[in-house]
């Protein structure tokens, strides 16, 4: 059993999805999907503890030895991400039954859970696999499921958003496919570890350069790096709220993981940062993304859209960490991936509760809402503080390491930019706080009650995680530190 | 109190206000119970602070550490002379202000009083966090909590003007603290590897003066609560708050948290010796001097009573900033003493302004002619407060000014000497006419109105603080001992 | 010779650009999907053609044959084709739903309707 863990991680949700189809009833499907999610969560914890204790876990699919067969490889870099994906998925599924009541017609509930499980299987697959082509396959599984989930949104604009994402996502994935194909031509292998060994022999060829360029651009499309982010705000704003919660907390992180894996592991640090102006490009785009998206976020009335833009800005921070090309920088990136998952999960769940009660999350209708929904808005407040990077929340920890990494490089202006970015997030979070807490309840405020416990409990688990990991940092920081050391120690 | 360990007492100074917050929210329906909770909490806190003071005088070190977030980055507290001064001032004045507020808020028929008392308690709790913080990180956290918890107090009236004021308030304080203060903290951590307040500073020998100088500039501008120009505008903007808030928070707690932070940073992060070698110290000193004079000049032109007092505060705060930048023992001593002296003086003035507002509904200086006959106690207290701010005997303010002057002399800063003397003259020009005019006879033909004093709790409060100004002149010894022990 | 020897890649590039152009420039959602399919197909051709080795035969073990074409790329692309079909099908399904709720499949008209709402 133990040795099969890494494949079980992916197989369980993948097999559960068609089984879900048999359970026609919405309630049953929900119970089953949630159970499956918690099962994968247990598996991912077991994997993480095994990786921490004994080092990377490798699994040969079907008994075919790597590099011929497909290898699943879980190490310090992807194990925490597996935990994040399955944890967020479990919590979101807990809330999903209530949340989709008003947002998705009853007869589509079963399909919703199927698409969810497939999406989850895809994301876990991308993360766990050690095979480049497998990355593409799982990327498409998760993407197709995602398009479906987004299209389930109540507003008809969800369809348009889904279509836009489908086009952008397919182009991105095809770019990745081209990159993988070119790498295969040059090396004759698809196994990542094998690629890493063989690429240096041919690294000065135009083909490898092209492969690298296609791969990076394709991945940037999926992770919504400014200016390739245009699909994201609509998709997040119009998807069912609980879907947004799941995607915002996990999907872009997985794309970032792919980027890190290819830049640092497969192509190698030296290749990526010496042959290409990668550092300059990522730095510029990261900073531009932080500023542009944060400023746009300030002017949004739809809060889901506001947080979507904030996600684009946060991707900027994550990319900034990569562009430092240092061990501290990559550690800050990994940390911020996990932490951002926690904060965005909490924030979007709070919005899901608002949408559940009010039908929409328009700021102009939320005057004095905190007196009606105190627990929900308190969760939003803490999540927002974490997003800003206030001490004692996770947001502070990752910003702290980001700034340290910037200072380590001697990039004082960049450190200042990070803080200015936080200042912008203060503005857009504070707008909400002011309206929700300090405006008197007006006539346009719907007469609503506090959200049901089914939404509050997962929300507050995430909020408390935001605080807990903001104070007790040894686990998250320790894991990221080890992963960063692996990336720099092993394959430099 | 003897049964409590000093460590516990120290933590309770922060926890009791938080408990009071919960109590106030729960008992919000009945105003008597709610206010009783406030009074009891402030009594307990005062007792705790006095207990801590006796512990401190006995020389027992008190240290508490809550948790460590990262190596060298912990939430911990330590009892130390400067913090003790600040805590004593805040503890005494909280109780006084609660009494004052009860009279004021009731006769002014304010709304949302539960939120008012709740935020007040939280603000005071964070003041103790600032006072006892043993490192810059802890201090920063409580500094921000203080900003956020006072925002609802500033916008209390809920009018458009209050909201505009609140936005300026929050914008400047949060903006400077994140853009400059936090940046300076990160820079300090990066250069020195620690944020612990250490006697003589934390920067390793050989730290480049350029880096140190830059960090100093960031600190001075980043601590927006110290209201050095050009980041002073939030203070006049905050005057839209109810008077007890202006009195305690914007004459004592918030602004003093600012200058207190600067004194701490100057003494325990940079260290006076290192401070002396920095190229930017003098420039900032001149800026502080200019701030003193310019704010006084603006104050002269303000007709709104509270705004005039606010600009006077801006000017007085720069005294303390200048005291730190002088980088001499006497400067630090004077600065620390001025925290206390100015607190008692300025709070008296604000109490009087509020008393006049609730009894006679007058907000402008030009309306005050002859009101001394109606409110003799209030205006007498005002006179004493004025003298203390100017720094004339027989009031406490004269001592702190004396030490600041001798600090300037030690540092050979004739410019600052001149600034201090000139500003005293300006103080006389914009403050003293108020009590004098008040005791002028009313205009011809108008009958002398009957005595109509402020509500009793408020009257008691302002008499007490005025009395304290006098007491501190006669018995400055305990305060001086505390202030002088900071640098040893 | 060099130029002609690589003609398969030229085909791929030309097809890819045609597909890309259609995706970006056409206003009709169905046409966009057609463009997307052409775009993907070009990559399929790239994979298929690069597995071919000059002189190599089909990879079936037989006596006397030493040079085989690489079958792996073909197998890989089978998967990618399936993915491509799924994408197209899903895209078309979404277009059908868009037509149901907007009454049009023209991009500018959809935007105009969203603006009105």
Image (spheres, coloured by chain):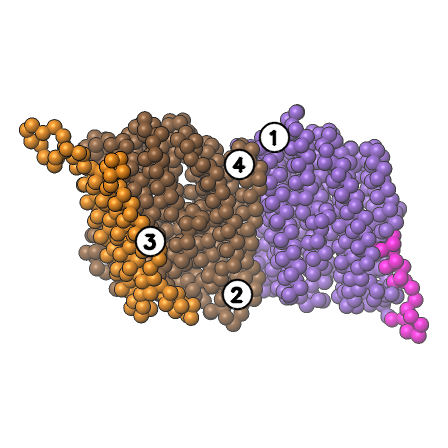
Magenta region, residue range: B428-449
Chain letter of the residue carrying label 2? A
Q: What letter labels the chain drawn in purple? A: B
Q: Residue at x 93, y 74 (%)?
A: B445
Q: Residue furthest right?
A: B444
Q: What's the CA distance linking mark 2 and mark 1? A: 46 Å
The percent coordinates of residue A305 (x first, y second) are 44, 58
Residue bearing mark 1:
B192
Q: Evaluate whether label 2 is on the same chain as label 1.
A: no
Label 3 crowd bin: few (<14), some (14–19), many (20+), radius 10 Å: some
* Circle nearer the viewer, 1 or 4: 4
Q: What's the CA distance linking mark 4 and mark 3? A: 41 Å
Q: Which mark is residue A367?
A: 2
Q: Evaluate whether label 1 is on the same chain as label 4.
A: no
Please say if B35 is above or below A382. below
Q: Residue at x 62, y 46 (%)?
A: B177
Chain letter of the residue carrying label 1? B
C64, A18: nearer the viewer = C64
> Circle 1 sits in a helix, a strand or a loop, which is it?
helix
Sequence-earlier tag: 4 or 2: 2
């Amino acid at each position: 059993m133990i040795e099969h863990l890494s494949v079980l991680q992916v197989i369980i949700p993948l097999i559960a999805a068609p089984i879900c189809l048999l359970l026609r009833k919405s309630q049953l499907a929900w119970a089953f999907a949630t159970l499956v999610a918690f099962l994968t969560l247990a598996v991912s914890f077991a994997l993480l503890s095994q990786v921490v204790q004994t080092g990377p876990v490798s699994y040969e699919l079907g008994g075919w030895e790597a590099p011929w067969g497909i290898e699943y490889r879980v190490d310090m870099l992807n194990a925490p991400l597996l935990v994040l994906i399955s944890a967020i998925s479990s919590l979101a599924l807990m809330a999903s039954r209530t949340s989709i009541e008003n947002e998705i017609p009853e007869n589509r509930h079963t399909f919703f859970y199927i698409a969810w499980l497939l999406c989850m299987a895809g994301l876990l697959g991308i993360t766990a696999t050690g095979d480049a082509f497998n990355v593409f396959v799982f990327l498409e599984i998760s993407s197709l499921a995602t398009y479906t989930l987004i299209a389930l949104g109540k507003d008809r604009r969800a369809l348009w958003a889904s279509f836009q994402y489908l086009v952008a996502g397919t182009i991105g994935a095809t770019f990745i496919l081209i990159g993988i194909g070119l790498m295969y031509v040059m090396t004759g292998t698809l196994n990542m570890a094998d690629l890493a060994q063989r690429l240096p022999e041919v690294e000065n060829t135009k083909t490898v350069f092209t492969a690298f360029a296609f791969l990076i651009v394709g991945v940037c499309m999926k992770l919504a790096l400014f200016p390739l982010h245009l699909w994201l705000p609509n998709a997040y704003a119009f998807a069912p709220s609980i879907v947004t919660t799941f995607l915002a907390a996990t999907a872009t992180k997985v794309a970032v993981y792919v980027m890190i894996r290819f830049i640092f592991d497969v192509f190698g640090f030296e290749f990526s940062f010496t042959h290409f102006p990668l550092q300059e490009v990522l730095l510029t785009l990261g900073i531009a993304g932080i500023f542009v998206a944060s400023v746009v976020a300030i002017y949004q009335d739809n809060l889901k859209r506001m947080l979507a833009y904030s996600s684009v800005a946060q991707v900027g921070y994550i990319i900034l960490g990569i562009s430092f090309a240092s061990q501290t920088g990559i550690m800050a990136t990994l940390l911020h991936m996990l932490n951002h998952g926690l904060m965005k999960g909490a924030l979007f769940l709070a919005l899901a509760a608002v949408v559940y009660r009010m039908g929409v999350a328009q700021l102009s209708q939320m005057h004095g809402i905190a007196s009606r929904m105190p627990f929900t808005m308190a969760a939003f407040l803490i999540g927002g503080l974490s997003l800003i990077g206030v001490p004692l929340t996770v947001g502070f920890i990752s910003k702290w390491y980001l700034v340290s990494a910037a200072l380590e490089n001697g990039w004082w202006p960049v450190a200042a930019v990070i803080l200015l970015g936080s200042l912008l997030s203060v503005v857009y979070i504070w707008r909400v706080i002011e309206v929700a807490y300090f405006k008197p309840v007006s006539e346009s405020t719907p007469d609503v009650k506090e959200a049901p416990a089914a939404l509050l409990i997962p929300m507050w688990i995430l909020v408390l995680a935001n605080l807990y990991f903001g104070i007790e940092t040894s686990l998250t920081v320790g894991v990221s530190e080890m992963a960063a050391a692996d990336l720099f120690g092993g394959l430099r | 109190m003897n049964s409590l360990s000093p460590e516990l007492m120290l933590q309770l100074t922060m926890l009791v206000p938080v408990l009071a917050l919960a109590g106030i929210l729960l008992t919000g329906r009945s105003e008597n119970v709610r206010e009783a909770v406030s009074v009891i909490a402030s009594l307990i806190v005062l007792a705790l602070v006095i207990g801590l003071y006796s512990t401190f005088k006995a020389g027992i070190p008190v240290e508490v550490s809550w948790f460590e977030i990262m190596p060298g980055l912990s939430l911990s507290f330590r009892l130390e002379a400067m913090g003790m001064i600040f805590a004593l001032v805040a503890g005494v004045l909280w109780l006084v202000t609660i009494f004052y507020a009860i009279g004021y808020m009731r006769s002014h028929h304010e709304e949302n009083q539960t939120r008012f008392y709740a935020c007040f308690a939280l603000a005071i709790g964070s003041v103790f966090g600032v006072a006892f913080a043993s490192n810059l990180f802890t201090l920063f956290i409580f500094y921000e909590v203080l900003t956020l918890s006072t925002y609802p107090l500033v916008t209390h009236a809920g009018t458009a003007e209050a909201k505009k004021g609140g936005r300026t308030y929050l914008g400047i304080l949060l903006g400077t603290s994140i853009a400059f203060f936090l940046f300076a903290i990160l820079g300090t951590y990066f250069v020195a590897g620690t944020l612990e307040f250490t006697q003589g500073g934390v920067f390793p020998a050989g730290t480049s003066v350029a880096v140190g100088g830059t960090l100093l500039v960031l600190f001075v501008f980043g601590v927006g609560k110290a209201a050095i120009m050009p980041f002073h505008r939030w203070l006049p903007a905050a005057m839209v708050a109810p008077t007890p808030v202006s009195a305690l928070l914007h004459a004592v707690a918030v602004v003093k948290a600012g200058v207190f932070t600067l004194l701490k940073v100057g003494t325990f992060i940079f260290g006076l010796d290192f401070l002396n070698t920095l190229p930017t110290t003098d420039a900032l000193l001149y800026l502080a001097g200019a701030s003193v004079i310019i704010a006084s000049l603006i104050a002269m032109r303000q007709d709104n009573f509270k705004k005039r007092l606010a600009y006077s505060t801006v000017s007085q705060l720069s005294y303390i900033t200048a005291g730190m930048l002088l980088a001499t023992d006497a400067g630090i001593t004077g600065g620390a003493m001025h925290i206390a002296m100015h607190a008692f003086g300025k709070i008296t003035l604000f109490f009087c302004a509020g008393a006049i507002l609730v009894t006679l509904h007058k907000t402008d200086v030009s309306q005050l002619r002859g009101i001394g006959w109606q409110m003799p106690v209030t205006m007498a207290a005002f006179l004493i407060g004025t003298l203390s701010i100017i720094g004339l005997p027989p009031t406490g303010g004269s001592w702190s000014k004396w030490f600041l002057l001798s600090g300037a002399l030690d540092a050979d800063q004739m410019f600052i000497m001149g600034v201090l003397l000139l500003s005293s003259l300006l103080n006389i020009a914009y403050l003293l006419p108020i009590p004098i005019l008040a005791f002028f006879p009313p205009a011809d033909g108008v009958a002398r109105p009957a005595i109509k004093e402020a509500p009793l709790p408020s009257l008691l409060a302002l008499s007490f603080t005025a009395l304290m100004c006098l007491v501190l002149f006669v018995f400055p010894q305990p305060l001086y001992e505390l202030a002088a022990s900071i640098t040893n | 010779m060099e130029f002609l020897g690589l003609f398969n890649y030229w085909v791929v590039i030309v097809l890819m650009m045609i597909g890309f152009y259609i995706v970006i420039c056409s206003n009709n959602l169905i046409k966009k999907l057609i463009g997307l399919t052409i775009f993907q197909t070009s990559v399929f051709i790239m994979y298929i053609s690069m597995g071919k080795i000059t002189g190599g035969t089909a990879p079936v073990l037989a006596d006397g044959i030493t040079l085989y074409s690489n079958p792996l790329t073909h197998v890989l692309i089978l998967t990618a084709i399936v993915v491509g079909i799924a994408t197209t099908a899903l895209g078309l399904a979404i277009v059908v739903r868009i037509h149901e709720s907007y009454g049009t499949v023209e991009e500018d008209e959809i935007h105009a309707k969203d603006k009105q709402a």
